[in-house]
Image (spheres, rainbow, N blue to C red):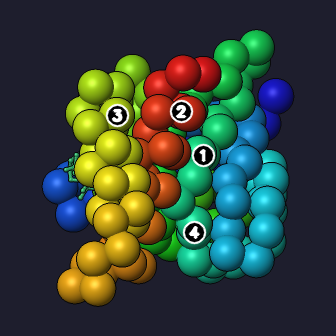
Amino acid sequence: MKTLTVSVVTPDGPILEDDYEMLSCKAENGELGILPGHIPLVAPLTINAVRLKRENTEDLLAVNGGFLEVRPDKVTILARSAEKASDIDVERAEHAKERASKLLESNNPNIDVMRAKLALHRAINRIEVAKH
Ligand code: ATP
């Protein structure tokens, strides 16, 4: 089976570099499935899971926005932050979820609603990816 090299990089450093048969993710324009030999493209990513398939296994990453760059034999994800499923601290994500939910429910006019929504979305994404 042909593979492509997937590299995930964040401002904190590299998160993953390995060979996979397929990558699926959610770009702002919709779901993308990338196989080796894909045409080059650059796409902004949503806060979502990135699925990496190889043989009979699937690795999951929580990717919290950023960009995907596809070349025929390589995919690079430049993410604002990203965690492998096994590196996610679920308790921390549950706390972040609760904090953001409370802020959004508070109706306090001084809160940055978009910021709280993004924090909630990151926390939910981490919890979902860790559960997989
Ligand atoms: P928190 O409020 O818990 O810090 P956050 O969504 O604001 O969450 P980010 O700014 O996205 O956090 O990330 C800051 C750093 O902490 C990144 O390196 C990110 O990978 C890491 N991180 C955040 N939440 C978790 C988690 N639940 N488990 C593991 N690493 C995490």
Q: Amino acid at mark 1?
A: Val
Residue closest to the eye, 127 or 62: 127
What secondary structure is found at the residue carrying circle 4?
A: strand
Q: Please name the residue that numbered disc 3 is placed on.
A: 94
Q: Amino acid at mark 3?
A: Glu
Q: Nearer the viewer, mark 4 or mark 2?
A: 2
The reply to whether the C-beta atoms of the residues labelled 4 and 3 are less than 8 Å apart is no
Q: Please name the residue that numbered disc 2 is placed on.
A: 129
* Visible residue check, residue 48: yes
Residue closest to the eye, 11 or 97: 97
Left or right of 74, for residue 126:
left
N-term-proximal mark, 4 vs 3: 4
- Check the image and name the residue furthest to the top: 56
What secondary structure is found at the residue carrying circle 2?
A: helix
Left or right of 7, for residue 98:
left
Q: Please name the residue that numbered disc 4 is placed on.
A: 45
* Quarter in which the N terminus is drawn: top right
Left or right of 110, for residue 53:
right
Q: Amino acid at mark 4?
A: Leu
How many angstroms separate mark 2 from mark 1 (CA)? 9 Å
- Check the image and name the residue furthest to the bottom: 109
What secondary structure is found at the residue carrying circle 3?
A: helix
Q: Please name the residue that numbered disc 1 is placed on.
A: 50
How many angstroms separate mark 4 from mark 3 (CA)? 23 Å
User: Ligand 1: does it lie within 8 Å of the C-beta at label 2?
Assistant: no
How many angstroms separate mark 4 from mark 1 (CA)? 10 Å
N-term-proximal mark, 3 vs 2: 3
Q: Amino acid at mark 2?
A: Val
